[in-house]
Image: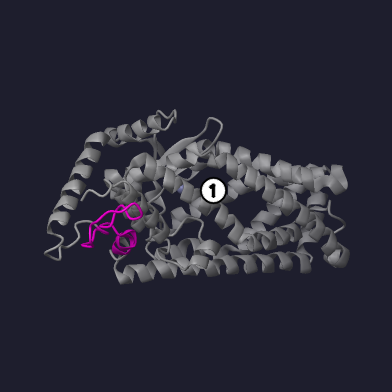
């Protein structure tokens, strides 16, 4: 199916290009496709496609978005920059509150009265900590996850189902977080000063395990995952997968429309739990060409081993992070430990301080973390274009993603705040690919 559609598209492209060439010198022909111009058509080695202006093609795509929609998406995305700051400051205030009022010490005392078994004390403290901080941070969470999403028309849930998802998330946090916290305090208590090296390793192994079980055990708690039924789309996707050496036999569909109007897809899992999942918004709103462009991108993540590279990157980040955590914990406890009623670094009451320190660390690291993922996303885009041969499908999808991501930011704005390339960057890559795949000099 894919071959036939591709040939049809190339044929249309060829005919429109030929027509443009014939009439170029006499009339101002409206460009049949963005980027084709009536410029002189002599091809040279330096400029093999004088009739296709990449920048003009990109601008033409971006101009398809009405100004009011663009303003709305810009406002939504720029609001997200401030939320990074507010989330950080809010969490710092909550943690300082737990320390300064002595609540953290009292929470520990309560856990110690219930049991003398230390791992259980840690688990009990964790339950108190997560419940109290969730309640204190609830107003910001409602604004960010519910009110704001509805204001911009991105959310589809009413408050009841939204709260249900929050509760499920809290439960997952209680269990997974509890296991990790018990392991980390166990290390601090046994290993003393060198704990942070092992702490970083345990954290990264734990993260890897969570990524592994995520698609099978955590995702289905929030959404329904089904095998993709549409035989036509499925076959073209599996054909592309085989062509790129991916041993996939199934593609999954997720009912993301339960929560959101966003178009998206992802690759998840590793070491045998990998799967490519398309969301139902994408399937409903995108043409087959657009879906192929998206699938090519997702396969890029898979073939380029992004999940393994992420784990190596996160391992380095957590090593630095735990070193900083250890140093900052000791430094702060020497100054304010007594006042906060924290006995030492092995005391569970130290947790709000640890969360505060890591919040500072990751706040400062925001551009670094964003750049790491954005770089991989760009690589996946390039892979996707080569795999799908759908530069216009890619550009159309990029415009749809522009409903919730600013399309045309400044250079530094993109470097600092974007965890995916902007619409302009992605469409530029697509149009550049397109220009280089036109028949050379033959218009
Ligand atoms: Zn991606």
Can you say whether 233 is above or below 406 in the image? above
Coordinates of residue 301 in the picture (x, y in percent): 48, 42
Q: Within 10 angstroms of label 1, few (less than 14), some, or many (20 or more) residues?
A: some
Q: How is the image coloured?
A: one colour
Apparent side of residue 183 relative to residue 189 in the rendered image (left or right): left
Residue drawn at 40 percent across, 43 percent down = 384
Coordinates of residue 226 in the picture (x, y in percent): 39, 36
Residue drawn at 57 percent across, 36 percent down = 212
Does label 1 point to a residue whose CB lies under 8 Å from ligand 1? no
Apparent side of residue 105 relative to residue 243 in the rendered image (left or right): right
Find out whether residue 248 is within the magenta segment.
no
Can you say whether 351 is above or below 10 in the image? below
**Residue closest to the eye, 79 or 38:** 38
Which quarter of the figure has residue 390? top left
Find out whether residue 46 is within the magenta segment.
yes
Please state, as top left, top right, bottom left or bottom right, where the N terminus lies in the image. Answer: top left
Apparent side of residue 109 relative to residue 215 in the rendered image (left or right): right
Tell me the residue that label 1 is attached to: 168
Can you say whether 236 is above or below 405 in the image? above
Coordinates of residue 188 in the picture (x, y in percent): 82, 47
Residue drawn at 83 percent across, 53 percent down = 347
Coordinates of residue 319 in the picture (x, y in percent): 73, 49
Segment tinted magenta in the rendering: 34-60
Residue 104 seen anywhere in this rendered image of the structure: yes
Which quarter of the figure has residue 91? bottom right
Identify the main secondary structure in magenta. loop
**Residue closest to the eye, 398 or 333:** 398
Q: Secondary structure at mark 1?
A: helix
Apparent side of residue 382 relative to residue 196 in the rendered image (left or right): left
């Amino acid at each position: 199916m894919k071959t036939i559609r591709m040939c049809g598209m190339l044929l249309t492209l060829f005919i429109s290009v030929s027509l443009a060439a014939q009439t170029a010198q006499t009339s101002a022909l409206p460009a049949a496709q963005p980027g084709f111009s009536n410029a002189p058509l002599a091809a040279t080695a330096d400029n093999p496609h004088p009739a296709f202006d990449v920048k003009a093609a990109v601008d033409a795509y971006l101009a398809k978005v009405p100004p009011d929609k663009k303003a709305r998406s810009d406002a939504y995305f720029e609001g997200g920059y401030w939320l990074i700051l507010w989330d950080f400051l809010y969490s710092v205030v909550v943690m300082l509150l737990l320390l300064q009022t002595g609540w953290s010490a009292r929470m520990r005392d309560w856990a110690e009265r219930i049991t003398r078994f230390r791992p259980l004390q840690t688990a009990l403290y964790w339950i108190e900590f997560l419940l109290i901080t969730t309640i204190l941070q609830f107003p910001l969470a409602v604004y960010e996850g519910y009110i704001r999403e509805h204001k911009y028309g991105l959310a589809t849930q009413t408050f009841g189902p939204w709260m249900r998802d929050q509760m499920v998330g809290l439960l997952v946090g209680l269990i997974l977080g509890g296991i990790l916290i018990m392991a980390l305090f166990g290390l601090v208590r046994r290993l003393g000063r060198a704990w942070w090296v092992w702490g970083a390793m345990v954290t990264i192994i734990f993260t890897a395990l969570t990524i592994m079980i995520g698609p099978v055990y955590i995702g289905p708690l929030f959404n329904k995952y089904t095998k993709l039924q549409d035989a036509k789309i499925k076959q073209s996707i599996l054909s592309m997968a085989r062509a790129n050496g991916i041993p996939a036999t199934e593609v999954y569909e997720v009912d993301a429309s339960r929560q959101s109007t966003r178009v998206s897809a992802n690759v998840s899992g590793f070491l045998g739990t990998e799967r490519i999942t398309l969301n139902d918004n994408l399937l409903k709103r995108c043409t087959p060409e657009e879906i192929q462009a998206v699938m090519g991108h997702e396969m890029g993540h898979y073939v380029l081993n992004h999940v393994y590279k992420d784990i190596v990157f996160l391992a380095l980040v957590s090593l630095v992070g735990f070193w900083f955590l250890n140093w900052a914990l000791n430094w702060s406890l020497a100054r304010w430990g007594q006042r906060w009623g924290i006995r030492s670094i092995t005391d569970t009451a130290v947790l709000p301080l640890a969360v505060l320190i890591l919040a500072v660390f990751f706040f400062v690291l925001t551009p670094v973390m964003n750049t790491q993922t954005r770089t991989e996303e760009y690589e996946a885009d390039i892979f996707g274009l080569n795999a799908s041969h759908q530069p216009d499908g890619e550009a159309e999808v990029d415009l749809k993603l522009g409903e919730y991501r600013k399309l045309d930011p400044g250079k530094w704005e993109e470097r600092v705040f974007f965890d995916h390339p902007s619409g302009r960057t992605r469409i530029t890559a697509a149009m550049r690919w397109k220009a280089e795949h036109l028949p050379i000099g033959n218009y």
